[in-house]
Image (cartoon, rainbow, N blue to C red):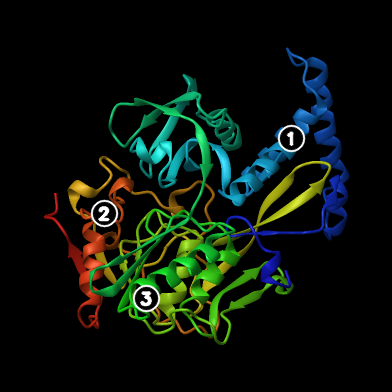
Amino acid sequence: MKTSHLRTIAIVGVATAAVAGFALASEVAAGPSRVDVDLLAGVMQLVQQDYVHPVGSGELTDAALKGMLSRLDPHSSYMTEQEFRESREDISGKFGGVGLKITDHSGLPTVLSPIDDTPGARAGLQPGDAIVSVDGQSTHGIDLMDVIRKIRGTPGSVVKLTIQRGSQSPFDVPLTRQIIEVHSVKSRLEPNDVGYLRISEFGAETPNELKQAIMSLQHEANGKLAGVVLDLRNDPGGLLTSAVDVSSDFLNGGTVVSIRGRNGNDDESFTAPASGALLPDTPMVVLVNGASASASEIVAGALQDRHRATVMGTQSFGKGSVQTIIPIKEHGALRLTTALYYTASGRSIQGDGITPDIVVQAAKDEQVENSLIWREAQLHGAFANPGTLPNSDVTPGSKGASPATASPPIKEQLIGTEQDSQLKAALSHLERAPSANPTVIRTSAPG
């Protein structure tokens, strides 16, 4: 892992050299024992010989690899050749489907975030919604990529999702599939020349889209923005390189994020260029919530640690691990957790998330109804927080998570609208001097 330019995919790196099948094991100091290999081969032979239906060795191998990787942690997995191809379509920002980012939670595919202006978003699907069936077929215990494949299909065709939202009774949501072209950055000029920038995910084109949006806002503001709101709410993450590039638009030089792996050779620090930030000094607020994860937490953590922005909103998701994509020649690819990342000050947000400087909860009528507050630490097999790096700048006990900093996320369709009370709070904050101490702002009475 010598350079950040080799890292792509969901806080994820890509090992660019493809490897041939089980030759991968030859690079590991202690590979599987002969007894283990014989056991696997023997079980596969028994299944092929005695299972009630014929099953090919390739199908069994794929299933064994999927089981092996998925038991490690919530984010490691094996992708078949088809699944690997589909994952690259996701990163390219164009695919057929309904526009939902989903993850596995307690054996059920669960919405991380709907993508703006897609069938899923227009239907009102929300972070935390569990997809309990697709076209009447249960999804419980089904491989996540198989569920995604069932949801995707020919543009114009209809897929019926059955949704479980909190304690509500399950309900059906019919969605018409379409070609999903992800434009990850939206912007507009707010009153008093404050720029509003929303990033819905960190794709390959996000840094370029952001630069264009910033330049457009500067032009509208006659060359001088009075402030910036960077909205990362409901942003499930994306590419590590994109997170670093986005941070660099607001930072001149210095550390953005560092990663630490099992071996010292895997350790790496990512820095912003010494000059070239488009908005190095403009007063800034970053908005986050419980559906802000991974790459969005890297950006929020960098700008918070470097005292470049005030982070507002509620506690973020808490995904602090890095996955590397390792293609296997003539097969699929491994998505393997290879490192943990640390913010500029040396803290890990694994399981904890980013604690806002100023906690602003969405109004009760803006929150996802009956939503459960679930986070990385609640996922099966999630890593414990490893603590801070040696010689870090973190004050013990600082910026820790607490119940007061978490709340259900805002409804997707309200983000950035006139009804968005968290955005209103961010705009108001930019109009006055920042507070020296974190506070909690509730935009409606607790209920």
Q: Mark 3 and mark 2 in contact (Cβ < 8 Å)?
A: no
Upstream in sequence: badge 3 or badge 1: 1
Identify the residue shown where x is 39% and y is 53%: 234
Please give the residue where the numbered disc 3 appears in the rendered image: 397
Q: Mark 1 and mark 3 in contact (Cβ < 8 Å)?
A: no
Between 60 and 220, which is closer to the camera in this rendering?
220
The dot on residue 146 is none
The dot on residue 62 is 1
- Give the percent coordinates (x, y) of residue 301: 44, 71
Upstream in sequence: badge 2 or badge 3: 3
- Give the percent coordinates (x, y) of residue 76: 63, 49
The dot on residue 417 is 2
- Give the percent coordinates (x, y) of residue 284: 34, 76
Q: Give neighbour class at mark 3: few <14, some 14-19, many 20+ (Cα, 10 Å).
A: few
Instruction: Tell us which disc is closer to us: 3 or 1.
Output: 1
Q: In this rendering, does residue 439 appear at all?
A: no
What residue occupies the far left of the structure in this picture?
A: 445
Between 37 and 241, which is closer to the camera in this rendering?
241
Identify the residue shown where x is 51% and y is 49%: 182
Q: In this rendering, does residue 183 appear at all?
A: yes
Dot 1: element: helix
Q: How far apart are marks 1 and 2 (CA)?
A: 45 Å
Say left or right for 5 vs 169: right
Identify the residue shown where x is 63% and y is 45%: 89
Q: How far apart are marks 3 and 1 (CA)?
A: 44 Å
Give the amino acid type for the residue marked by disc 3 in the picture: Gly
- Give the percent coordinates (x, y) of residue 393: 46, 84
Q: Distance between the residues labelled 2 and 3?
A: 36 Å
Query: Quarter of the image containing the N terminus?
Result: bottom right
Q: Give neighbour class at mark 1: few <14, some 14-19, many 20+ (Cα, 10 Å).
A: some
Give the amino acid type for the residue marked by disc 1 in the picture: Asp
Say left or right for 101 vs 217: right
